[in-house]
Image (cartoon, helix red, strand yellow):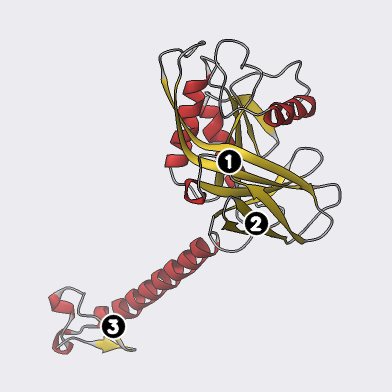
Amino acid sequence: MPVFIYGVSLSFLPRHHCYIQKFTIMSRLIFPALLLAVAVTLVSYKITHIKHTASHAGGDAGFAVVELFTSEGCSSCPPADAALAGLLNEGKSNVYVLGFHVDYWNNLGWRDVYSNALYSARQQGYSGIFKLNSVYTPQAVVNGKIEFTGSDTKRLNDAVENGLNHPAAGLVEITAKSSGKVITVLYKLSQPELNSTINIALVQLHAQSNVKNGENSGKMLNHVNVVRNFKTVNYKLSQGDVVIEIPEGLVASDCKIIAFAQKASGEITCAAQAAIQ
């Protein structure tokens, strides 16, 4: 018959220790020590488990907003587009990727249908922040604080991990509801700052182009999270709404919304994404 001490079964011990008639002075010393060891182990496991769970909950988790400035007219960009897709496919929480297609390659043989002069201007703004002599593609910017060649997967992974290991400086919550071709995005910020902006990006989840001319002539190019509409609001209140339109040829289910708050210095303080309802 198994022995129970303080409600704990000792049936897991070797057979010759589990019967009262074979108890010895040594066993009376061993049992309390074993019970103490088991109790310490259980308490230690429970504390470790609680800490691990808490690190993934709440508003203090890290994040990484990855902006890739790219172009279908640039032969160096497909590897960067692939690196962005690879990062997205890893499925990491709190990682937000955006493909900004610039327009200054459009006169060099191929017009990128996803390009926009506003995205070129955004990249030019980063050029000033990082004190660069010129803009280039492919360029990756992570959390508005570091820039590098977008096809450099090691620097990309390192920058993302660094962002995930540093708590966000605030919290943004968003919802997105569509009515025809119009989407209304409601946002709420926990710690709004003066001279900061909230950026709202409508991203196309997947895109593909058969390039006929230019440096990538003859290639089928694939893209993820292509920015198709982008609005920046200088917010004064902790909550508000932004109206954004879906481009022709797309429906709401083709897209999602990514929002992020950004200081005048370029630093991104928090981010969120939402499916369109």
Tell me: residue 165, above or below residue 105. Answer: below
Amino acid at the residue labelled 1: Pro
Label 3 crowd bin: few (<14), some (14–19), many (20+), radius 10 Å: few
Q: Which mark is residue 247?
A: 1
Q: For marks 1 and 3, give the one nearer the viewer.
A: 1
Q: Which residue is mark 2?
A: 184
Residue 172 seen in this snapshot:
no
Would you say 46 lies left or right of 239 here? left
Label 1 crowd bin: few (<14), some (14–19), many (20+), radius 10 Å: some
Going from the N terminus, do you reach mark 1 or mark 2 first?
A: 2
Q: Are marks 1 and 3 in contact (CB under 8 Å)?
A: no
Q: Are marks 2 and 3 in contact (CB under 8 Å)?
A: no
Amino acid at the residue labelled 3: Arg
Would you say 190 lies left or right of 202 here? right
Question: Regarding mark 1 in the picture, which secondary structure is present there?
Answer: loop
- Residue 96 at x, y percent in the picture: 56, 44
Q: Which residue is mark 3?
A: 28
Question: Regarding mark 3 in the picture, which secondary structure is present there?
Answer: helix
Going from the N terminus, do you reach mark 1 or mark 3 first?
A: 3
Going from the N terminus, do you reach mark 2 or mark 3 first?
A: 3
Tell me: residue 89, above or below residue 137. Answer: below
Tell me: residue 145, above or below residue 60. Answer: above
Residue placed at 47% from the left, 64% from the top?
Answer: 48
Amino acid at the residue labelled 2: Thr
Q: How far apart, in angstroms, are the residues tagged by discs 1 and 3?
A: 79 Å
Q: Which mark is residue 185?
A: none
Q: How far apart, in angstroms, are the residues tagged by discs 1 and 2?
A: 14 Å
- Residue 227 at x, y percent in the picture: 59, 37
Q: Nearer the viewer, residue 19 or 109?
A: 109
